[in-house]
Image (tube, rainbow, N blue to C red):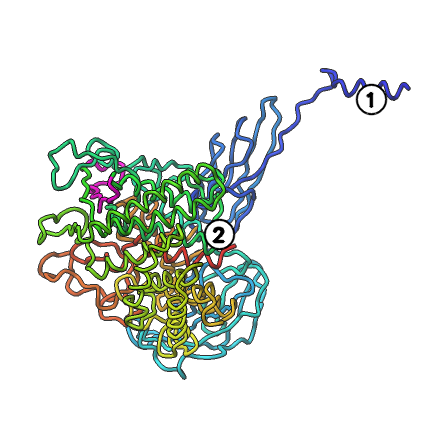
Amino acid sequence: MKKGLLLAAVALGTPAWAQTCQPTALTPYLNINGTSSWVAKSSASLNAGSRVVLGPQPTSGSWSWSGCGASGSSREQTLKLTASCTATATYVNSCGARSTLSYQFNVWAPPAANAGRFIMVDQFGYLTNAKKIAVIRNPKVGFDSNVGFWPQQLRLVNSATGQIVKDNWWPSSNWNNYGVDPASGDQVLYADFSDVTAPGTYEVVDINTGERSARFEIGDNVYRNVLMQAVRMFFYQRAGQNKTVGNAGVGWADGPSHVKAGQDPEARRFLDKGNAATARDLRGGWYDAGDMNKYTSYATGYIQGLLDAYLESPAAFTDDFNIPESGNGVPDILDEVKWGMDWLVRMQNADGSVLSIVGEGGGSVPPSTITTPSYYGDASTTSTLAAAAAFAHGAKVYASLNNPALTAYAADLKRRAVSAWQWAIAHPSVLFYNDAAHGNGGLGVGPIETDDHGRDMLRLTAAIRLFALTGDATYRPYIDGNYQTTQLMKDWTLSGVNAGSARELLYYASLPGATASVANDIRSRYQSLVTRSDYPSWGGVLGQKDAYLAFIGDQYIWGSNNLKASQGRIFFDDLDYKVSGHTADEVAAAAGGYLHYLHGVNPLGKVYLSNMVSFGAENSVNRIWHSWFMDGDPKWASAATSTYGPAPGYLVGGPTNSQWSWDSGCPGVSAQCGSAPPAPPYGQPAAKSYLDFNTGWPLNSWSISEPSDGYQVSYIRLLARFVK
């Protein structure tokens, strides 16, 4: 009885004299580069020069710091790590009790000068059970032909522990009986380590010569942070978006661009600039590439590509990509699509037609400082057909999310899609060329019109998407009557160039209500071409036509990296639509070759993404041709020498072979020409025709180093297939 009374008294509350001030439990959070998602962890292994943001919780109370360069009383600390270290946070709560928390960072030493010269690996790593091949090169033709390498004795070493995982290891095969690959000018051997599956950080070392690969990870989700940066490229490309430090990282925070007087919220008609009555609210959307213009017919393709990326790999796209909309219950990629779609909605006129372009001013950095006015181009059949397809595609996806607000949004997009289609059919040849020959040049960069066949293809895509959305058979006759004019059917072509349009046909063939004979014809043709021995796709893979395991033939043209990504996607299209019968493992191995090429398995050992040192790349792109990140800027010109460099994750165009040249007036037109064109890219085998530069006129780097939202979409769609 007495014991019960005592317990009851304790339950009523501890007397004041018995209370004590207790330390607060701390939760560690960190954010790599300030541009990824916050994760609850207190340690990381990173490359030298990586940035990391520490943000322990709780958010109230007082903080102090020591170690790793951390200091002061701010709860969040942004550090640039140059050596392994421990950062210690001390927290004092409201009653005066102290708590401490330590962050441990293992910082890899800067790569040796010979790392990745001759032994090429995916610098982000390999999935646990994936095919893993180190490509070993011996240069024979090109700028590096004066140095050679022949492997002696290879080891696979755990970088953290020094453990030898494979020893006395020799290349198991070679390319074309030691022949010289014409695309790269290299002899190539292959060292397979697919049997190594233990998670960790590794490197391939030749113990006799000292040559080594870049470091790489093996794990079950090694590309997640890479995908996050690739998708976030669209966030940095947003016009009119306030880019806070919390979302953009300290290096790329900026106020909203193109929202001043006379800019996007009150853009005027280009052909009637002096008429204030033509002002339209055309804010939002994305900068198209390295220029900041917004082209309707291009942007609609980006919208559809991102929607397809989500549909193909929904598990890869979570709600924590650290954009302003993160945490709203909608996958962040669909939030990003909506940013572009909202702009497209503003571009539509009441009669259903859609404006063709918004020309954005430039001339200063960061973009928020730009003051030049914005103008729009008139509506055209081309832009309206393109928008009809995007509206329809978006309506179908957003309606599937079981989100009341987005269901209403989808219904509005459906109405807009039908309205755009009806206008375009009634006005089949309204054109806005944006060139001087037609009296309307000077808005944006270059002509924006397509030809009659191009409009027919846009109409075909719109009809497919509207048929898929509505089930209305009135769209089907145009599809059935025109599918044979596509490159797949008419020209017997299937490659990275027409991967998108070929997939549209496969999609139609899969729809309930598609004409059976047409569907069978499409599938039969696709199967014939995807498996042909003299074509890319399975012919290129099974025939081992490319020494670097990513065959595109002679298509090292402007945007070759886009073609690499698109060609890799074809294998997954084949799998998704069950065309050739190849297994999921075979598809992953084939497509993986194209992904690994973009991640460093190429003759330059270059990761073709910008500023990715914080995410594992030892040799990523330092310079891109972009209006924000231009040559000479002390903050953003170069990831290697500027304060911040370009934002991470931009895919550049890549090697262009003969499609790059300095200005025709060089060398006499300017001292900046030099005495001869830089080599590389000049005069090199196709896959070596690349230089990490962002010089404008007269060296004209844009055909090589300019990014594009279109390249980015192709890469995202390929990469997402390897992310959980």
Residue annotated with mark 2:
314
Assess whether residue 367 is covered by the magenta stretch.
yes
Does 180 sit above or below residue 639? Answer: below
Tag 2 and tag 1, C-beta contact below 8 Å? no
Furthest-front residue in this view: 474
Q: At 21% across and 65% down in the image, what residue appears? A: 659
Assess whether residue 330 is covered by the magenta stretch.
no
**535 or 188, nearer to the observer:** 535
Residue 316, horizontal then vertical, whole percent: 49, 52
Q: If the image is split into quadrants, where does the N terminus sit?
A: top right
Q: What residue type is labelled 1?
A: Leu
Q: What residue type is labelled 2?
A: Pro
Query: Residue 121: which quarter of the image?
Result: bottom left
Can residue 669 be spotted in the picture?
yes
Can residue 113 be spotted in the picture?
no
Segment tinted magenta in the rendering: 351-372
Judge left or right: residue 483 versus residue 80: left
